[in-house]
Image: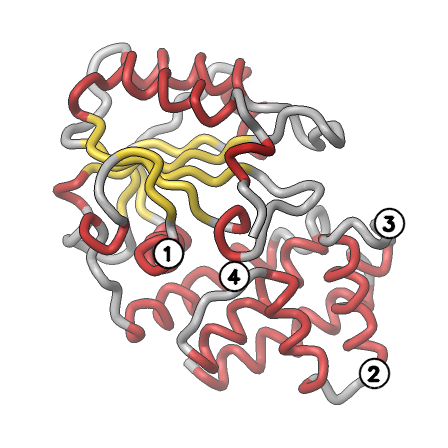
């Protein structure tokens, strides 16, 4: 597997430095997760980071961390060979074992940049997507600072994982018109996890799903999304139009049948 920290030598240390400057000794751990550890960074992959802190971001800490991330993260779409987009989830340690869906203290992602630049602040929130992220991170995340993920993050039951997928589906499907590739591949990954209990990279999930899709045209759309994710094909309208909607409905039905 490629060393994903070497592919972005300045950005990850910069995020670590910003967290330490803003939160000090309250930073308990920082993990690299997502595609960087599950299969290697793809051409448009974000750098996915998870920070565990002992306490919330009081006072001006939230604004200071946001300002640092707006400087460090590349705007979407990131320039090939240049800095990447950063996604950072910050979770308080006391919240890790309590409540469903999971609670985040702070979330930064490039899809939110416009709101942040307009003056909005990343406030604490609960979301089933956070439950799925923590479940995958507990199994796969690579520590950049702090103990191994399995020591810090509680194991999330398959029942909660399945409930989180069911609850996350409406919001995911609503994003299909503007983000067809990611939505279709995420649905394939959900189907794989619902069927096997394992988490794999998006392209691996698509490769697993395609032989099980009865309609060759639907399978071809998913294959195109997979190849676009790998940088082997250009984005096309078929990932946002009627073909994508039909495939998304099929994948949704397969997922719900397992939940």
In the depicted structure, whether residue 242 falls above or below residue 183:
below
Q: Who's the residue at 44% across and 14% down the image?
A: 68
Q: CA distance from mark 1 to mark 2?
A: 32 Å
Could one spot residue 110 in this view of the protein? no
Q: Earlier in the sequence, mark 4 or mark 3?
A: 4
Q: Earlier in the sequence, mark 1 or mark 2?
A: 1
Is the residue marked by circle 2 packed among few (<14), some (14-19), or many (20+) residues within 10 Å?
few
Is the residue marked by circle 3 packed among few (<14), some (14-19), or many (20+) residues within 10 Å?
few
Local SS, label 1: helix
In the depicted structure, whether residue 4 falls above or below residue 227:
above
Residue under label 1, please give it.
Answer: 128
Locate residue 230 relative to residue 12 in the image: left or right.
Answer: right
Local SS, label 4: helix
In the depicted structure, whether residue 117 falls above or below residue 170:
above
Q: Earlier in the sequence, mark 3 or mark 1?
A: 1
Q: CA distance from mark 4 to mark 1?
A: 11 Å
Could one spot residue 204 in this view of the protein? yes
Disc 2 to disc 3: CB gap under 8 Å = no
Locate residue 27 relative to residue 125 in the image: left or right.
Answer: left
Q: CA distance from mark 3 to mark 1?
A: 31 Å
Mark closer to the observer (4, 1):
1
Residue under label 2, please give it.
Answer: 216
Image quadrant assignment for residue 244: bottom right
x and y, in percent, of residue 37 in the image: 48, 51
Residue under label 4, please give it.
Answer: 170
């Amino acid at each position: 597997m490629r060393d994903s920290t070497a592919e972005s030598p300045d950005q990850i240390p910069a995020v670590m430095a910003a967290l330490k400057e803003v939160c000090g000794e309250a930073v308990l751990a920082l993990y690299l997760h997502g595609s960087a550890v599950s299969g290697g960074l793809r051409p448009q992959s974000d750098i996915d980071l998870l920070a565990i802190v002992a306490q919330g971001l009081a006072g001006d800490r939230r604004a200071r961390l946001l300002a640092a991330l707006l400087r460090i993260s590349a705007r979407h779409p990131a320039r090939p060979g240049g800095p990447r987009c950063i996604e950072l989830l910050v979770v308080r340690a006391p919240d890790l074992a309590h409540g469903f869906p999971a609670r985040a203290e702070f979330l930064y992602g490039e899809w939110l940049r416009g709101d942040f630049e307009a003056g909005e602040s990343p406030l604490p929130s609960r979301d089933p997507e956070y439950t799925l992220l923590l479940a995958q991170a507990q199994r796969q995340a690579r520590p950049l600072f702090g103990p191994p993920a399995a020591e810090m993050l509680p194991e999330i039951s398959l029942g909660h994982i399945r409930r989180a997928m069911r609850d996350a589906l409406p919001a995911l499907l609503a994003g299909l018109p503007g983000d067809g590739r990611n939505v279709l591949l995420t649905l394939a990954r959900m189907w794989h996890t619902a069927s096997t209990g394992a988490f794999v990279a998006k392209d691996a999930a698509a490769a697993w799903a395609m032989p099980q899709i009865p309609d060759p045209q639907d399978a071809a759309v998913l294959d195109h999304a997979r190849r676009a994710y790998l940088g082997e094909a250009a984005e096309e309208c078929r990932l946002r139009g009627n073909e994508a909607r039909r495939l998304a409905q099929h994948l949704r039905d397969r997922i719900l049948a397992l939940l």
